[in-house]
Amino acid sequence: LCRGAPPYRLLSSTFDGVPAGLADADTIFALSSGHGRCGVAVVRVSGPASATSLKYMAGFTQRMPPPRTALLRSITDPRSKEVLDRGLVLWFPAPHSFSGEDSVEFHIHGGPAVITAVLQALGSVPGLRPAEAGEFTRRAFQAGKLGLTEVEGLGDLIHAETEAQRRQALRQMSGDLGCLYQDWSDRLKRCLAHVEAFIDFSEDELIEDGVLNHVDRSVCDLQAAIKRHLKDERRGERLRSGVQVVIAGATNAGKSSLLNKLCQRPAAIVSPIAGTTRDVVETALDIGGFPILLSDTAGLRESPDLVEREGVRRARERYCLLTAICPADRCLLVLNKTDLVPEKQRQKLDRELRGVSGLPPVCLVSCQTDEGLKDFLTVLCGNPLFGAPTLTQARHRAHLQQCVAALAQYQGYRDTDLALAAEGVRLAVTSLGRITGRVGAEEILDIIFKDFCIGK
């Protein structure tokens, strides 16, 4: 949504309620609702000439309509004065709009001819041009309406296909993840301010004793918190991008039965004859809100049959491809047909397998009785929305790892070179700021002068 936007730009000054850098921006317009025939289409205009579009196309020549109030108007072509449609118009004066600029919405009928006519008419209004991809959201970011994590959450919400994806994206767009990172950033800025104040003013005895000890504790606590945040088994990332699952194993182990049970339909042929499945059978599923691409494969064994050998080769290829891009600890050992084993023997087997070190998580299931399937799905998918917000982007993980390394720099130089130690905290602040899109030196100075009575 914000590709090509100036990275991490701070816009602090304003002009008539519009952040500096937006006051002289072009006025843009675009269809904001979906393409194709629909009952209502929304055309959005944003920028300093938005009021001009209302004047030329909706007849507001004397004064603007009440803010955020829908009014039914005739929408006309400014060149021919022909009525193009009758629809609702809404006026959003800056800064109380999505983009932070003056904005207008035209709610028109959703026929292709109506939409095309209105867009062409807007193109003839002086000062207006068609918007580029993601430009409304980019302006919202530049105006400080959204941080980068909220922008990414908005993009994920638009592309969400499952309920869990929607909930995770909405949680991120609402600012949960951004608030967590901003809280860490604020605490690090305070640490940096204290260290720099100690470097500059400790010789004048203007800084109280114990300041660096407090910084040491804060840095240690933050480093531990970020490390815990990184140990999330990539739950958020897997939910966002989906999961590929390959069912591999010996012939007649119940692989196709497990596939059919998860699909809740006969997606694969099941028979007592070994080697029935001879190709990769794929199906897309929504399991507990997780988008999963599930692949059933041919049973692994040596076979004289030419076709079955090709199926086994494809099964091994699919398994090797998946393990090459996924951590080895993402494997599960599933033992099917537990209904054929006596209860006491099954319990003993379960205990013994769980006691074997280095063995993947073990799930005992029965596709005949459904026993163990619920526990299997819990192990397979987990609950990515439980607890604190999780990472959803690879770039978040990279910046957080840089942050942890920078805090290690502080700890390494703390007793030998305080200037280099302070640089470590500064790099950590920068790494967090690159996640949220907010990086600024003035905030450090503000904390110094707020927390310390320097020069009193």
Image (tube, grey):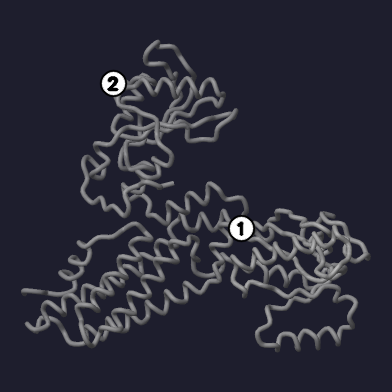
* Above or below, comparing residue 69 to residue 85 in the picture: below
Which image quadrant is residue 185 in? bottom left
Q: Nearer the viewer, residue 69 or 208?
A: 208
Image x and y of residue 32, in percent: 48, 35
> Tag 1: Cα neighbours inside 10 Å, few (<14), some, or many (≥20)?
many
**Mark 2 = which residue?**
62
Q: Nearer the viewer, residue 332 or 174?
A: 332
* Above or below, comparing residue 412 to residue 385 in the picture: below
Query: Do we see residue 104 in this rendering?
Result: no
* Above or below, comparing residue 327 to residue 109 in the picture: below
* Above or below, comparing residue 344 to residue 450 in the picture: below
Q: Residue at x 15, y 69 (%)?
A: 449
Q: CA distance from mark 2 to mark 1?
A: 54 Å
SS under mark 1: loop
Quadrant in which the C terminus is drawn: bottom left
Q: Residue at x 21, y 41 (%)?
A: 15
Q: Is residue 165 left or right of residue 107?
A: right
Q: Of marks 2 and 1, which one's residue comes earlier in the chain? A: 2
Image x and y of residue 335, in percent: 79, 75
**Mark 1 = which residue?**
242
Image x and y of residue 435, in percent: 38, 61
Q: Residue at x 57, y 53 (%)?
A: 166
Q: Residue at x 34, y 57 (%)?
A: 437
Query: Do we see residue 147 in this rendering?
Result: yes
> What is the count of numbered marks?
2
Q: Amino acid at mark 1?
A: Gly
Q: Are marks 2 and 1 in contact (CB under 8 Å)?
A: no
